[in-house]
Amino acid sequence: MSTDAALVIPEIPCSEECLLREGNTNCGGCGMSLGLNMLARALADADQTCQLAIPACCGIVAAGAFPTTAYSVPTIATTFAAAAAVASGMVAIRDLNGERHQVVCWAGDGGTYDIGLATLSAAAERNEDILYVCYDNEIYGNTGGQRSSATPPGARTTTTPRGKREAKKDIIAIMAAHRIPYAATVSIAHPDDAHRKFLTAFDTVGTRFLLIHSPCPTGWKSEPADSVNLVRLAVRSGLFPLYEVFDGLRYRINARPDGADPAEYFARQRRFPSDAVDLDTTRRVCREGFERLETLAQAFPG
Amino acid sequence: MPLDVVTGNHAAGHALSLAGEANRVGRGTACGIYPITPQTEIVERVAAFPFSRGRVVAVESEHSAMGVTMGASASGARAFTASSSNGLAYMVENIMVAGFYRLPIVMVAVNRTLGPPWNIWADQGDTLMLRDFPWVQLYAADNQQVHDLTLLAFRLAEDPRILLPVLVCMDAFIVSHTQAETELASQAQVDDYLPALNLPHRLDPSHPRALGSMVWPAATVSHRKEIDEAMARVPTVIRECRSAFLEIFGRDPGGAMEIFETDDADAILVASATVATTARGVVERRRARGERVGLVTMRLFRPFPADALRAACSPAGRIGVLDRDYAAGVGGIWAQDVRAAFQGRGDRMIQDYLLGVGGGDVTPDLIERIVDDLMARADGDAPVWADLAETWTTAPAAEVDA
């Protein structure tokens, strides 16, 4: 094989059904991979196409190295904080040219909760017609597992070696406070609910925000085969409630916690040292958090 | 053509707006804008322009201003913005990326002192710090040049042989806020000069590429080499853009540099922007006295036109570089490149003069002193802080003059 052969750009099949193609670099049990497949399925179902703006995160590493790409749609790798700004430029030109594709930001929690928050806030304030999807693995996964403001209390990361002390930032509340038309949590353990939420997002104009609870077996020190079970447990125990917020004002709960004990969720991930999670406090926070949501959903139903 | 009396910022905002509007026959125009003194008037003009196919996005930071501009440009639109000083510093990451993406963005920068301590006056340190990125840098000396070079910048950036972003720079207040007679282009002229942009690597569903994702070292070498080749083509393409400009607008926008009285000069000043304008008056007076002094006015800083500079300075034994900037631990930034241009190619004395740093007045008298010093000194030495009074009370050249 000549040395130039590696630089020949292959013909790229363009199919929404294979948004994330074979040969991508994601780990086994990666929640983000499932999330992308859910996006692809919803796009195909809605007969829609998309373009991706992806900041620094595993989502862009997944594309693989030039001259190949695992993504079957036009994709731009933005700087860490810039995804929502770059997407705003893409939306402007899409609209000026009468094009109809979805402009999707696909970002991790670091690029959303932390470094990209001001950019995202500004795009939301302008109500840019962007579908912003945060796959939240609660860690800087791409750099080997450091804390983010999405990391839950008790979790051990390389920068919180004794377990994180601070609470997880409530990003949905922050986005809802911008009065964007649609914000919702998504679990890969609830594919029908996720599908409906993607379709709802496609049917909504303006800034739409989906938060996917996205297992990272490498960072969570969990079994890849256990990923879906873990996030299902998070929904059942009230750690990650499934709900939607419309126009930042009206709430709809999609799944009720069934009383499962969050203790099992923690026990099955080695990122949580046995003495780092205050289970009584966690149970109380989960209960109170859901009660608050329920109150909102009853008072301001969506 | 009728003359308008406008500020440098007005001239820049006019040129940017008409260039964007001209791409209504292409994929339109968009930009992210954010205010910073003394650039704000530029983006205000852009925001007020009635684009028939354009969108101006007022964002929350310079970083996002370039982010929006990049998203629009990558989508095949004509895209531009403007900034200054610490705003450029905040934007730096995305400035770098726009170059690496090979996006033909035009940015007008008003050269303002980097802070702290906070200072809004003219100093080129802000744009010169961007020197290692894949951006062409042009420096204008007056309102007309701001206007003309901004239009030229689009044609240069969008040329398929170049596809690099271009920075057009002007001095804070001295140009940005000073009204002067300026010939402003009409939309019809700009439409003629700037055909629809066709960006070959735009985000395109029929060719779904991943722009800017990972590469291995070998492909990175190719990427950098291609940038180097495009940079090398800039002087040729500028000449073509200049000829086309002359044809459509009926005036010469100027090229990479302007040489004045250099043919037989014993001493040559190398300067840029408004400092060069003041230096020209000094050179004229020296010539009237029979002294063989010349001037090279640099407009192009990146790529650095080393060959042309050497050719312009060939007879001169002494070169004085006038730097309105300071690189910590080194001295003047232009001087470094001037020295590099001559390194190993003949024996010339090159002296660096820091003047007008932080926006201090650059008077003819100050440049007179510099010329005296340049003519009298035996060898090039550490940078001369020309703004400091003690420089001239202790320097031997000043004593000789006295």
Image: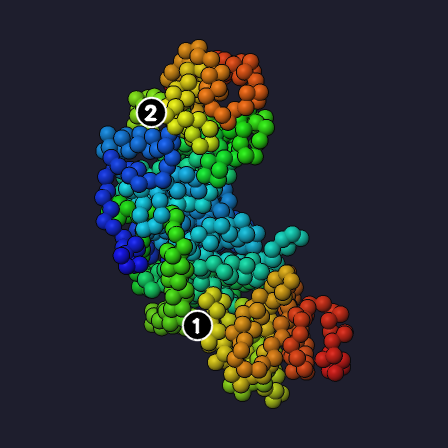
Nearer-the-camera pick, B359 or B75:
B75
In percent of width and height, residue B289 lies at 62, 87
Question: CA–CA distance between discs 2 and 1?
Answer: 59 Å
Q: To which residue does mark 1 refer?
A: B255
Q: Quadrant of residue A202?
A: top left
Looking at this rendering, what residue extends furthest in the top direction? A259
Q: Which quadrant of the figure has residue A196? A: top left
Number of numbered callouts drawn: 2
Residue located farthest toward the front when viewing the structure as drawn:
A1
Q: Tag 2's secondary structure?
A: helix
> Label 1 amino acid?
Gly
Is the C terminus of chain A in the top left, top right, bottom left or bottom right quadrant?
top left
Q: Using the image, tell me which numbered label, if any, was put on residue A194.
A: 2
Q: Is residue A270 above or below residue A296?
A: below
Q: Residue at x 38, y 20 (%)?
A: A229
Residue B339 location (% of width, % of height): 56, 73
Residue A53 coordinates in the image, percent (x, y):
38, 42
The subunit letter for the residue under badge 1 reads B
Q: Chain of mark 2?
A: A
Q: Amino acid at mark 2?
A: Ala
User: Is any atom of residue B367 visible in this view?
Assistant: yes
Which quarter of the figure is the N terminus of chain A placed in? bottom left
Residue drawn at point x = 55 percent, y = 20 percent:
A274
Q: Is residue B401 above or below residue A11?
A: below
